[in-house]
Amino acid sequence: MRGHGALRRLGGWHNGTLRFTVRRHLIFALPIAATFVSATMATHVCALIYANMPLSAFAAMTLTGPLNLLAGQIAMQWTQATGILVAQLLGQHRPERVLDTFLSRAWAGAFVAAGLVAAVFLAVFLALDHVYPELEAETRAILFGFLPLLMLIQLPRATNAICGNTPRAAGDTVYVMHIFVWSQWAFRVPATALLMLYLDAPAFWVLSIFLWEEVIKFPAFHRRLWRGDWKRAQVAA
């Protein structure tokens, strides 16, 4: 502030002045930050609820966490990169047909990424005896029960991520935030508590909540994307 504070009063800021530039940046960025903070908090709350599971089921849920995080990066990085490129194309004022062509190819790539993630899960589970040689038989059985869910969820998760990152790149961050936050706190957390604390459901049905969450988000994300408003966004305004 002592050495460069005068820069605040100079012209040339993206939105005229430093104050309005920072204000617009925060309007765009805070819903994105809130989305990730909400996701982290919801995950921790669900983890606390999982502690009520029998030991073998809790162990199975715990073991899927790091694997899901690492393998999921394949599809997640692809969809986030898609959002970055969509923002660049919008900033270059490319015609809608160019945007449609790019997104259709990116979407095909997301399907490939989802298939790769599913293949990683299949390979790890087939090699489970080598990865976790001292795993209890009951925990191993629960993990193999998880496999169809973990493979099936990758496709809706990838396509939802494309639909989330594309409007977000066009500045529609509040709508995307609402989809994530409401699906987490109005569905995932209460459903997890209901199945675990009141119905004493098996671990398979508790894990299936993640699949149903993607199904719930599917129409809200895809309806917004197909409406096409994002293609006319003025991202450099």
Image: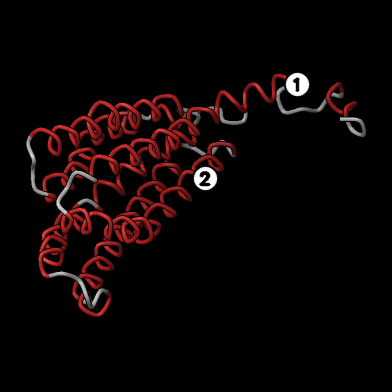
Secondary structure category for the residue under label 1:
loop
The quadrant in which residue 69 appears is: bottom left
**Relative image position of residue 167 (x, y in whole percent):** 42, 33
Q: CA distance from mark 1 to mark 2?
A: 24 Å
Looking at the image, residue 102 lies above or below residue 134: above
Q: What residue is shown at x 35% (from left), y 44% (from top)?
A: 161
Which residue in the protein does label 1 denote? 16
Tell me the crowding category of disc 2: few under 14, some 14 to 19, or many 20 or more residues within 10 angstroms, Cα based: some
Q: What residue is shown at x 38% (from left), y 37% (from top)?
A: 39
Q: Determine whether, in the image, residue 193 is placed left or right of residue 234.
A: left
Of residues 75 and 94, which is closer to you in this image? 75
Of residues 221 and 147, which is closer to you in this image? 147
Of residues 93 and 14, which is closer to you in this image? 14
Rendered image: mark on residue 218: none
Q: Determine whether, in the image, residue 191 is placed left or right of residue 93.
A: left
Q: Are marks 1 and 2 in contact (CB under 8 Å)?
A: no
Which part of the image, by quadrant, shows the C terminus?
A: top right
The amino acid pointed to by label 2 is Ile
**Relative image position of residue 107 (x, y in whole percent):** 34, 50
Q: Determine whether, in the image, residue 167 is placed left or right of residue 14.
A: left
The quadrant in which residue 231 appears is: top left
Tell me the crowding category of disc 1: few under 14, some 14 to 19, or many 20 or more residues within 10 angstroms, Cα based: few
Q: Determine whether, in the image, residue 21 is placed left or right of residue 131.
A: right
Which part of the image, by quadrant, shows the N terminus?
A: top right
Which residue in the protein does label 2 denote? 84
Secondary structure category for the residue under label 2:
helix
Q: What residue is shown at x 73% (from left), y 20% (from top)?
A: 19
**Relative image position of residue 94 (x, y in whole percent):** 53, 39
Of residues 41 and 124, which is closer to you in this image? 41
The amino acid pointed to by label 1 is Gly
**Relative image position of residue 181 (x, y in whole percent):** 35, 29
Most extreme residue toward the right, as rendered?
3
